[in-house]
Image (spheres, helix red, strand yellow):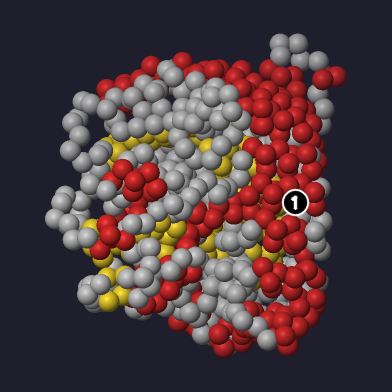
Amino acid sequence: MEGRMNYENDLVNLKATELRLGLPGSDEPTEKKMRNNKRSSSEISEESRTSGVTDQAAGVNDEHEESAPPAKAQVVGWPPIRSYRKNCLQAKKNDEVESGSGMYVKVSVDGAPYLRKIDLKVYRSYPQLLKGLENMFKLTIGAYSEREGYNGSDYAPTYEDKDGDWMLVGDVPWE
Amino acid sequence: MESSKLKREKDSQISDELNELRMESSELKKAKDSPISDESYRRSSFPDEVLERVISLLNSHRDRSSVSLVCKDWYNMERWSRTHVFIGNCYSVSPEIVARRFPKIRSVTLKGKPRFSDFNLVPQNWGADVHAWLVVFAAKYPFLEELRLKRMTISDASLEFLASSFPNFKALSLLSCDGFSTNGLAAIATHCKNLTELDIQENDIDDKGGGWLSCFPESFTSLEVLNFANVTSDINFDALERLIGRCKSMRVLKVNRSVSLEQLQRLLANAPQLTELGTGSFSQELTPRQYEDLESVFNNCKNIHTLSGLWEVKGLYLPALYPVSTHLTFLNLSYAVLQSDELAKLLVHCPQLKRLWVLDTVEDKGLEAVGSNCPLLEELRVFPADPFDEEIVYGVTEAGFVAVSYGCPRLHYVLYFCRQMTNAGVATVVRNCPDFTHFRLCIMTPGQPDYLTNEPMDEAFGAVVKTCRKLQRLSVSGYLTDLTFEYIGRYAKNLETLSVAFAGSSDWGMQCVLAGCPKLRKLEIRDCPFGNAALLSGLEKYESMRSLWMSACNVTMNGCRLLAREMPRLNVEVMKEEGSDDDGRADKVYVYRSIAGRRRDAPSSVLTL
């Protein structure tokens, strides 16, 4: 599971459409606060479950998650589960995510009490993804246009790319 | 299940008779040796024929060992009548020695690698290859019928050799083994004309496809036990259906995930006599008609007492199992992701349950249902569905454990993986269930204290050993000081197996156990602050034990060398990590008694001192 990206919606759409050359992270205070709201209900576990193991394995961790400890190195042979059972559980997880490895990303929304995770592989295009986000968070994002970004809504989907820059969702071809 | 209970009762009756005979025999010896030989003390010797007959009825290998120690005559009578030999550590004895002592063996059980190899703590090429044994058996026991291996390495070539060397071969059981592929299974299927049992469980198999199953010849009808849940690739269903159809004595069938519900229904329609069933995938979309067929076929299977499999189970289809649930004594749901309400609904129909294995997705509420519905429960195993995901907070807790203990007073075997536990919870559990023989508690975060009081979990395990006088096996976890081990040494007088991880404060802890537990046979320790003083305090003890494992402790190479020097009848093996220096820490130490001397097949990473 390489290249996890985070989608971020800002309330103030000016900020969202603003082209900034500043260093990533200048928005951090608000973002961090939201992202650190971890629910303890089983629901979030349900969604993060499928990517949990591979996350740890890849050692990739959300850079903004400062309150959560960095991915702990798994202790070899602990908990004491037979390799056979471990492999079965892993196979089961892969099955659940159809194509063999889900591409789960965290989504946080300004003002929402907790974060969600979505599987990017479930969607085939940006409009589908946006629809999914709209359904999940009960909000409108509006239509994408190259010139104006996401006009007509308070929310704009952004993500952090591998260079650490905040990018608007939709500019780059889906593939 | 029932027949083994009867056997045990019979064995203990015979044991009692033997004890009497033994006492008589030693009286006789004493009488002979005593300076005042009084005629009144002499009794007529027990006729040999009777003695032979009695000894030949013994099944327990421990009883047979005791019998063989009485005197030379008894030793000889025992060795000529033994047909099954159990070897708990394949390196404790050589195949030649076994063959020399026991000329009439027809069934062998062999265990190889240390248990921690199940958790990847033992290097791949460590050993425990069965081939040398097979070669001796082929020469000395050509009529060998049964071979049961646990944690051994067996190659395809060995399986082929096995298949072609023993014309009477009947039963092969492989548990937690490695080194073979489905080609080896094909050889067994092709050549073993008298096979009654093929039991392949939890092995590391190189799965090259399901063609092996089609290798059973059309003329082959003797199979009674077939367990291939472990071998996941698709098999030829027609071949399986025909095989089941012609093996009229089949009583145990455990298929793999590739077998669908509809296919399962077809198999069961032809095998209503089954007593143990492992289903395949339990999640196919069924039409109402198909569902009815499934229900009706389960209705016809009146003899099923053990059920497992249920991969990808859909709660929706569980009711089809209700006709079978009422007679179930063992239900293995450890590969079925069920929520608490789904389990609760099912358990209402399982009043006879004695053994239950589940995933922790059922949570405490599911375990409450266990307590409410299964009063006859004797064994509970709760496995973690996501042992490695640290974001998970669900699972089972002390609440579920306590709930089960209130409803199931006969509980004597527990394996419980949880993320939180309390001393009070455990104390309540053992107060309700004082008959524990096997208590394996795994608090999954290493070194975690009682989550309510923040104290060590010492009092929990103290309660276990003080209350459960019959305790044979104990696995401890959580934050533990030496006090836990003081308790164990002081109270656990029947303890045979102890597993310790991330626990203890000093050498004193391990010393208490070694000094205090007279029946200790297997001690496995990892990541504990026990060092040379502790290791060396058990010098004489280790000869009365099967083995000792210590890894990531404070034992040094010098300590191990000293042990090896003082105790020549022990094999002291150190597994070297790459690049570690010679006089430093001994990272993984495995010590075991042996009459075969040091082994000659150790890889370069294993040093025998």
Which residue is located at x 71 percent, y 34 percent?
B429
Where's residue B317, x and y in %? 69, 73
User: In this view of the protein, can residue B96 be seen by the observer?
Assistant: no
Q: How many marks?
A: 1
Say if B252 sits above or below B397 in the image. Answer: below
Which residue is located at x 46 percent, y 65 percent?
A139
Say if A139 sits above or below A145 in the image. Answer: above
The amino acid pointed to by label 1 is Ala
Where's residue B377, x and y in %? 76, 48
Which residue is located at x 65 percent, y 42 percent?
B414
Q: Is residue B252 left or right of residue A39?
A: right
User: Given the current orientation, which residue lies at the most extreme top position?
Assistant: B36
Tag 1 residue: B369
Which residue is located at x 72 percent, y 85 percent?
B288
Where's residue B550, x and y in %? 40, 32
Query: Which structural element holds mark 1?
Result: helix
